[in-house]
Amino acid sequence: MPIPIFDSRDLRCKSPFGAVKAGETVSFTLFPPPGTLGAELLVFPADQWDSPRRIPFSPALSEGRPAWQGSFVPQEPALLFYRFELSTEDGSFRLLPDGQNQGILAQEGDALWQLTVYDGAMSTPAPLQKGVLYQIFPDRFCSSGSTKENVPADRKFHGDWLEFPQYLPDPDGEYRNNDYYGGDLKGIREKLSYLSSLGVTALYLNPVFEAHSNHRYNTADYTKIDPMLGTQEDFSLLCQEAKALGMAVFLDGVFSHTGSDSIYFNREGRYGEGGAYRDPQSPYREWYRFRQDGSYQSWWNFDSLPEVEEENPSYQAFILDVVERWLGLGASGFRLDVADELPDSFLDRLRERVKAVSPEAALLGEVWEDASNKVSYGQRRRYLLGRQLDSVMNYPFQSAILNFVRFGGGEGLLQGILTVLEHYPAPVIRGLMNTLSTHDTPRAISLLAGVNPEGHDRVWQANHHFLSLEEYAAGKRRLCLASAIQYTLPGIPCLYYGDEAGLSGLKDPFNRTTYPWGLEDTGLLAHYRRLGQLRRHPALAENGSFVPLFASREGCAYLRQAGEHRVILSVNRGSVPLAIPLPAQLRDGCELFAGPAGKELPGESFQILATPEEH
């Protein structure tokens, strides 16, 4: 392979690859054209663009060619950016990234490479290091049929588990999300053996605390399990039985707002005459942002979701105790809802408390963009530097996979993957939540079948919820391709309940229908069980290296390797056969794990080769 002037992803040019630990030496080698008289590295701390650190390079010989080399040691966790300046016989030039990762010479320009420097003490919590994470929307997964006690009378119950969810507003035009199917914690316990058959090693539960909507993102009482789901004892039993099967349980932490219908705010009066809205002397009053006219600040202007002051000492102390309580009852960590809206001081203290309970307890953040360089509300965030989040929901991978499988572009897929791998610390990468569907996004099978909900209202989405036989067959083929990629990338695949059974659906509430027990697509189930087995392979379980092997418009291939253990995935998303060249030395010693044999892949198919393992 020809050596570029500089390539941030080529170990001949930069070592080590990607993010580095504080105190670790970062070495650079440039291969500029003849006539170069000098070179230096310019390092910019994030958002300090006028005062770079300048590091002179020295001439050297590398790879049999004249080169310029230099290094530096970042001492503290920080987000850094860099470029180079060269002096030549023809004048001075900047060496800038070309939009991907290679360097180009220019006389002006502000493009920079990113270097993430993280705390060397950072590690990946054990429950995130291997296996499969399974996301459950509790009301819709499984109902035990047990009698529920103390359930508020204003909740509406579906008489049929397979009935369509309520999607039209109430007569007054409000969407109250108060229709329930009765899924509960005991129901989840009853399906633990099923989850184990999928290779699941951790559960992520959407909110389970008392709240007056089926999604429960409008918390009413952080100290209680919602009565529709069961009791505190049910929760502890779920954690105990899951642990016995090698599964951790993660909870959804909704800490940027509460419900207006809550013991803390109590606008609706369900909890007597107390609460911040009704009583100016309430101990909860200072938690909220009231205006002089009596109105209050709410999350995205939904008045049923009043925002809290996360930096309020009373609120912080309360939430820290809540987190410790549920960790003590068996939870293995929290996924933090809208992490962008939680201030640094809150995240700092939350991490301290969580790690004080257990160093292996995890904090995962909902961040939709590149979390390593995120700016939210005008502030540069430091989620991934080692002192806040352990990892994040990996929406960049989700977008890259679905776009490739639906529209093509193998090079774009691999570049998107490499960007995340280059920017994120290794401990964060090992715990990335790699998902194709979530409660906030349409079901992957619907998108891959070609159903686009953008610009359409709920009535249209309801009419397009059930796929035609032709659409379903296309969506299923493509979902198999997408999930093969999902399950073989660095991180941990996060399977949204029902994707493995063939559930379709567009936006909320259509992506939250009930699991179709007894009506599953058995072919898809077998596919996901096979992928779950693959996750035990050392190349994936040990989060081995990621090496791109091939990319075209219709296909791609890459290698995952840990020591002598290898997994190779090849994908053809096109409609005609595609020959994917793989180096013979990589294929040697591998056996066919899944897909058709041979070097040529049929249309819309994938192939997995792996070194044989005793599992």
Image (cartoon, helix red, strand yellow):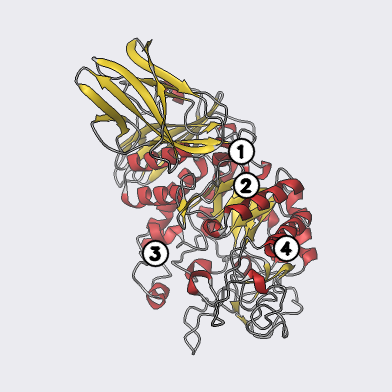
> Which dot, 4 or 3, sits closer to the camera?
4
Residue 208 rendering spot, x and y as whole percentages: 67, 66
Q: Name the residue under label 2.
A: 199
- Label 2, residues with CA under 10 Å away: few <14, some 14-19, many ≥20: many
Q: Earlier in the sequence, mark 2 or mark 3?
A: 2
Residue 15's disc number:
none
**Contact (Cβ within 8 Å) of mark 4 with mark 2:** no
- Label 3, residues with CA under 10 Å away: few <14, some 14-19, many ≥20: few
Residue 2, compared with residue 125, is above or below; it is above
Residue 222, compared with residue 269, is above or below; it is above
Q: Name the residue under label 4.
A: 318
Q: Name the residue under label 3.
A: 469
Mark 4 → mark 2, Cα distance in angstroms? 36 Å
Amino acid type of disc 4? Phe
Q: Name the residue under label 1.
A: 536
**Contact (Cβ within 8 Å) of mark 2 with mark 1:** yes
Residue 308 rendering spot, x and y as whole percentages: 60, 67
Q: Residue sitting at 68 percent across and 68 percent down?
A: 209
Q: Which of marks 1 and 4 is nearer the N terminus?
A: 4
Q: Earlier in the sequence, mark 4 or mark 2?
A: 2
Amino acid type of disc 3? Leu
Mark 2 → mark 3, Cα distance in angstroms? 29 Å
Residue farthest to the right? 233
**Contact (Cβ within 8 Å) of mark 1 with mark 3:** no
Left or right: where 262 falls relative to 5: right
Mark 1 → mark 3, Cα distance in angstroms? 34 Å
> Which dot, 1 or 4, sits closer to the camera?
4
Q: Residue sitting at 50 percent across and 86 percent down?
A: 170
